[in-house]
Image (tube, coloured by chain):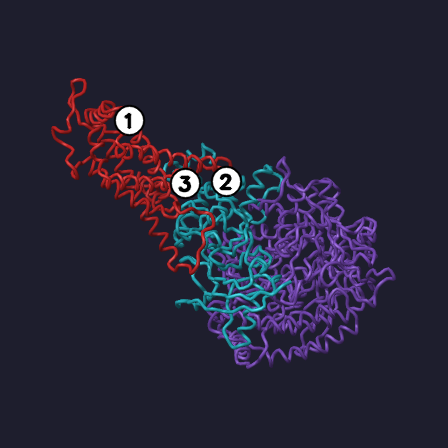
Chain colours: A red, B cyan, C purple
């Protein structure tokens, strides 16, 4: 038993081990982002659809489901962030003296700025949770935000989304974050196939294309909501 | 043949002391000369004018020993693809160009003098496990184990690495993953290398980390800079081999390993 | 002192086996008490260091490069010979032995060559087991190609970089032993002198090229695996750092230098393009499998682009002169034929010092793709250097100094006349006679290191009390003081000229007078001028910097100083050998058709020179060569 723990901790402390953790937690977050977006897009199907969906999430497993998901996601985020910060510190230390001239030949800006897009997204996530989950930035609670559907009282998610995104500043920050997420995902998704050892000579291009397509899908899908609110399509 | 006049910005440093860029005018350089021959000409003039010549590593001057290094205009071995500094020729530069010449920079490659760095870390990584344990005289007949042409060719692709360190120099993280993956990958893909595969993979990666190289963020600057065009797919393989080896080390005992034939 | 080659008695085919059986052994517990110093980490050095360490000896290995992997063996392109007969084309140990003796123009020691051919098969097995990725057929078995001087396919190869792959194999074996703690590796460490105690080589003096520190190392035996002296010509295919210092310093301490005049000029190198040039680049001999060598027949075609010269106006001179070997004639013969064509004024390219190596026919026959597969990396290298594509127009090639068959004299056990000093690989003189066949250098280096020295060092070591000599012996202090004195003299010299300018001048002189063709007048002139140049070097050389840190000019100065002395011996040997054989061509000694004329009656011997303290008066010792198996004959490739 102890040797298993010892070996595993040695594994995750190594550079490749940490990278694999980043990739694995990244995969969890990538899939969450997709699910989250699909759920939110229900807003276009009308208030009832998204409110019922929200209620389902809140009440599955007697309200335990959402906490399991939250804790799982929290763990993924924490591991993802802690491992990347530790790797980045190691890499900074690996080149203490900078070049007078350094020219990137093939890598894109998104790839080179993963740590900054990632940290900005972390700030965004904190704000986003305070805004819509903890709701201590705006008061989205109380009777104003209650709605009854099929005889059940539930939170009016639709109204919260519309009110929340009707602030131009909030929407702008949201859209900016989504642009950063686009960059983060376009490198991250194809990258995780590499780190998990799945890319091959032939599939590598496909994975790269998947990464870009996926990132674009998330960007368009997520931005459509605040834009629709600001444009008055959702009200 | 024409002659070029160039402005050089050359890194000068003594071991263990801070360094600086020195401006050197390189006049009337034949464009048929190699980059190192240009440096020879510059040094010849520095010496006869009473100055200290620029120290730089070089030996075979035919692109195979891996001794020459130099970051030229921000790129290891200069602007030509798949070309070492010694094989880079001045015909790729233009009259009046400014050329930045720096050592390969990494914590694991401390500067010895000027453009010379100590790449002993690469040796130590290979000492950790970059070999097949076979005593002289104990080998079976060379044709006893057939190895498909595809496998042999792939191993040869990895084996083409000349250990110059351009991959580390090009990487924003000063990561040695391309080098280590090519070295481990060559042996890990051959039948002869299977018995020690896990042990080799773990040992080499651990030594790489210990030497203070950074990690791989999949930018593939290493592949673009590699004079032997080693593919980053070897890094994929190292990731895979390392994950398998790490998990096997944690969970699989000697007996189960024997059952699995590993 | 008579030279005893210690060739075992009995039939040729069983000499080596019997010698191994009769050799004394050292028990494993005692092996640990012996320290062996291995200088050089190329094929011979790495393989010897690794194998001796496997056997249990304590080994210290030294190289001047920053890593053992960078020794110049790495640059060998074409391949390595072995009498495996995997092709079923009639090869055998005897045939490889015969080809090598004949290829060496009957100036090699038969018993050594036979042993080399015998162990050649083990080398391939060993390398494959280490993971050397030799080329293979689709069925998974090893592929072969043919090389100059042989009519069978016995050359194993790894793309165009067989040398690198074999060296990496030996280096991996060395790494395995370094990790085990049985080899202590000293890279960026250069030998400055050999220390002799009571007539035995017992240590070396080195300089740490990073810190400048002069250090003494004592051992029970010293192995020099330091390569050849081709850089005496300044321009050669050798690496910039290749030097004669180790063997020359040993020579000054009593080791005989044998046959220095046997220098190999490789026929397929990229021609010189200007006086700034620092080295010449070899194009593998394997190119001659598919390339056809030609020059224009008619004077009016000189200077025209190749494609404008009609087929019937081309002189495929190797095919014409040597119909049975054609473009695969041995190196010395091909080189001389190219030189003759250029001397007749039919050379191509700038300065008229070049001949064409044409792939047009091969590309038509096999397709560009196949040719690219076979030689792609060489074509790329050619294009990088010359800016021309060999797919579109013929390559231009010209001979260049490539390998030196001469070296320190050794007996059958690879020990020089200086007891304890063993010499392996290109640094010794033993196996290639007056000319080396392609793909045989790698074979010899690895044979010496993996299979010969591990057996033949024991008979010397058993006679020695392990660890009896330490660095506290006064000879070490004396040697260190000599080295320091040399360094002080260089640094204190207020000269005007750089080391390179002297090296270039020496090289031009030696190439001119003692290159591809030599005559008595030229050699005598060289012998007059070399001492003058040497004197000027010592009074006029300018070495900047200090001795207490990395100082590349100081390193070069030491090496060039030794070349300045060695060059004289080279020319003296060339003058004394009044015959033409292999790489040594005396224009006075040739047949009417221009072929080399050997003089077996008077020169069928090894010329081993002893240092007497006076560079102008070395003492010549002769080891007569006896041929039991191979009959001396005119070496014909027609």
Residue topped by disc 1: A44
**Could you classify mark 2 by the number of other residues whose Cα lies within 10 Å: few (under 14), some (14-19), or many (20 or more)?**
some
| Quadrant the N terminus of chain A occupies | top left
Q: Is residue B248 above or below residue C499?
A: above
Q: Is residue A141 above or below residue C456?
A: above
Indicate the secondary structure of the residue bearing disc 3. helix
Q: Position of residue C217 (x, y in %)?
A: 51, 68
Q: Position of residue C575 (x, y in %)?
A: 77, 71
Task: Left or right? Give the position of C302 relative to C122.
Answer: right
Indicate the secondary structure of the residue bearing disc 2. loop
Residue topped by disc 2: B194
At horizontal 83% and vertical 68% (from top left) the residue drawn is C588
In the rendered image, which quarter is residue C425 located in?
A: bottom right
Question: Mark 1, chain letter?
Answer: A
In the rendered image, which quarter is residue C573 located in?
A: bottom right
Indicate the secondary structure of the residue bearing disc 1. helix
| Quadrant the C terminus of chain A occupies | top left
Question: Mark 3, chain letter?
Answer: A
**Could you classify mark 3 by the number of other residues whose Cα lies within 10 Å: few (under 14), some (14-19), or many (20 or more)?**
many
């Amino acid at each position: 038993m102890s040797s298993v723990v010892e070996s595993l901790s040695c594994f995750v402390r190594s550079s490749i081990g940490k990278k694999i953790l980043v990739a694995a937690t990244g995969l969890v977050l990538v899939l969450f982002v997709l699910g989250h977006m699909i759920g939110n897009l229900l807003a276009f199907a009308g208030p009832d659809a998204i409110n019922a969906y929200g209620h389902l999430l809140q009440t599955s497993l007697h309200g335990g489901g959402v906490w399991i998901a939250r804790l799982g996601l929290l763990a993924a985020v924490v591991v993802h962030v802690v491992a990347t910060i530790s790797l980045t510190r190691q890499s900074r230390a690996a080149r203490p003296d900078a070049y007078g001239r350094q020219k990137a030949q093939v890598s894109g800006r998104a790839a080179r700025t993963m740590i900054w897009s990632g940290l900005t997204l972390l700030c965004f996530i904190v704000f986003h949770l305070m805004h819509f989950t903890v709701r201590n930035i705006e008061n989205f609670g109380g009777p104003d935000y209650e709605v009854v559907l099929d005889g059940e009282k539930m939170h009016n998610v639709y109204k919260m989304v519309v009110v929340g995104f009707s602030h131009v500043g909030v929407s702008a920050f949201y859209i900016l974050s989504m642009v950063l997420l686009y960059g983060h995902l376009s490198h991250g998704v194809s990258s995780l196939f590499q780190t998990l050892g799945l890319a091959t000579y032939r599939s590598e291009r496909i994975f790269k294309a998947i990464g870009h397509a996926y990132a674009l899908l998330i960007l368009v899908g997520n931005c459509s909501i605040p834009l629709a609110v600001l444009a008055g399509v959702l009200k | 043949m024409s002659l070029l006049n160039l402005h050089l910005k050359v890194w000068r440093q003594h071991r263990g002391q801070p360094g600086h860029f020195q401006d050197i005018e390189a006049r009337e350089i034949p464009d048929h000369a190699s980059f190192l021959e240009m440096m020879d000409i510059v040094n010849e003039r520095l010496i006869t004018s009473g100055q200290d010549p620029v120290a730089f590593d070089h030996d075979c001057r035919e692109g195979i020993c891996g001794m020459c290094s130099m970051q030229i205009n921000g790129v290891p071995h200069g602007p030509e693809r798949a070309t070492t500094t010694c094989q880079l020729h001045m015909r790729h530069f233009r009259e009046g160009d400014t050329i930045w010449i720096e050592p390969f920079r990494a914590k694991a490659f401390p500067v010895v003098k000027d453009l010379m760095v100590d790449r002993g870390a690469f040796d130590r990584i290979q000492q950790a496990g970059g070999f097949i344990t076979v005593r002289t005289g104990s080998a079976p007949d060379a044709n006893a184990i057939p190895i498909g042409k595809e496998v042999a060719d792939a191993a040869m692709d990895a084996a083409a690495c000349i250990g110059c360190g351009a991959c580390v120099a090009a990487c924003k993280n000063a990561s040695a993953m391309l080098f280590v993956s090519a070295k481990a990958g060559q042996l890990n893909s051959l039948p002869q290398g299977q018995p020690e595969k896990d042990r080799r993979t773990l040992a080499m990666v651990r030594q790489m980390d210990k030497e203070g190289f950074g990690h791989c963020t999949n930018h593939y600057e290493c592949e673009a800079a590699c004079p032997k065009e080693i593919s980053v797919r070897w890094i994929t393989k190292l990731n895979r081999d390392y994950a398998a080896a790490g998990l096997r080390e944690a969970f699989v005992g000697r007996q189960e390993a024997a059952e699995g034939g590993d | 002192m008579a030279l005893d080659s210690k060739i075992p008695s009995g039939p040729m085919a069983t000499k080596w086996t019997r010698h191994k059986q009769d050799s004394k052994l050292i028990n494993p517990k005692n092996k640990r008490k012996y320290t062996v110093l291995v200088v050089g980490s190329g094929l011979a050095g790495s393989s010897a260091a690794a194998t001796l360490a496997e056997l249990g000896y304590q080994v210290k290995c030294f190289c001047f490069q920053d890593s053992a992997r960078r020794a110049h063996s790495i640059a060998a392109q074409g391949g390595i010979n072995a009498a495996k007969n995997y092709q079923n084309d009639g090869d055998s140990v005897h045939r490889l032995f015969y080809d090598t003796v004949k290829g060496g123009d009957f100036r090699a020691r038969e018993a050594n060559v036979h042993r080399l051919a015998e162990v050649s098969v083990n080398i391939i097995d060993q390398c494959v087991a280490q993971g050397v990725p030799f080329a293979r057929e689709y069925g998974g078995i090893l592929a072969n190609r043919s090389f100059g001087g042989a009519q069978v396919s016995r050359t194993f190869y790894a793309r165009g970089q067989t040398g690198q792959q074999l060296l990496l194999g030996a280096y991996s074996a060395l790494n395995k032993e370094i990790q085990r703690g049985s080899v202590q590796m000293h890279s960026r460490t250069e030998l400055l002198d050999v220390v002799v105690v009571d007539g035995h080589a017992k240590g070396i003096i080195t300089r740490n090229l990073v810190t400048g520190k002069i250090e003494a190392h004592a051992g029970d035996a010293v192995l020099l695996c330091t390569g050849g002296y081709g850089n005496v010509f300044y321009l050669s295919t050798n690496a910039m750092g290749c030097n004669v210092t180790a063997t020359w310093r040993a020579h000054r301490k009593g080791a005989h230098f044998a046959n220095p005049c046997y220098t190999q000029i490789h026929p397929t190198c990229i021609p010189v393009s200007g006086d700034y040039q620092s080295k010449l680049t070899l194009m593998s001999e394997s190119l001659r499998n598919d390339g056809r060598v030609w020059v224009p027949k008619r004077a009016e075609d000189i200077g025209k682009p190749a494609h404008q010269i009609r087929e019937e106006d081309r002189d495929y001179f190797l095919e014409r002169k040597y119909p049975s070997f054609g473009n695969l004639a041995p190196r010395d013969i091909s080189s001389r034929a190219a030189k003759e064509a250029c001397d007749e004024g039919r050379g191509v390219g700038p300065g008229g010092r070049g001949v064409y190596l044409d792939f047009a026919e091969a590309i038509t026959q096999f397709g560009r793709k196949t040719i690219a597969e076979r030689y792609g990396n060489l074509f790329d290298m050619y294009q990088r250097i010359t800016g021309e594509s060999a797919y579109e127009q013929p390559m231009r090639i010209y001979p260049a100094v490539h390998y030196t068959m001469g070296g320190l004299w050794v007996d059958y056990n690879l020990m020089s006349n200086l007891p304890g000093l063993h010499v392996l690989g290109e640094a010794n003189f033993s196996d290639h006679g007056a000319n080396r066949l392609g793909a045989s250098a790698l074979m010899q280096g690895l044979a010496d290191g993996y299979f010969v020295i591990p057996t033949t060092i024991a008979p010397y070591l058993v006679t020695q009390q392990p660890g009896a000599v330490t660095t506290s012996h006064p000879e070490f202090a004396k040697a260190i003081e000599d080295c320091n004195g040399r360094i002080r003299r260089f640094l204190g010299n207020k000269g005007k000229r750089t080391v390179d300018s002297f090296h270039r001048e020496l090289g031009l002189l030696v190439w001119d007078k003692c290159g591809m063709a030599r005559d008595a007048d030229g050699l005598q002139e060289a012998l007059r001028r070399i001492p003058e140049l040497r004197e000027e070097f010592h009074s006029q050389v300018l070495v900047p910097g200090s001795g207490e840190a990395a100082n590349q000019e100081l390193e070069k100065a030491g090496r060039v100083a030794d070349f300045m002395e060695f060059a004289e011996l080279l020319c003296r040997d060339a003058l004394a050998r009044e015959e033409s054989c292999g790489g040594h061509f005396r224009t006075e000694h040739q047949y009417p058709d221009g072929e080399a004329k050997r003089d077996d009656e008077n020169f069928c011997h090894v010329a081993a020179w002893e240092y007497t303290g006076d560079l102008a008066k070395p003492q010549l010792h002769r080891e007569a060569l006896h041929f039991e198996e191979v009959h001396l004959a005119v070496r014909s490739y027609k």
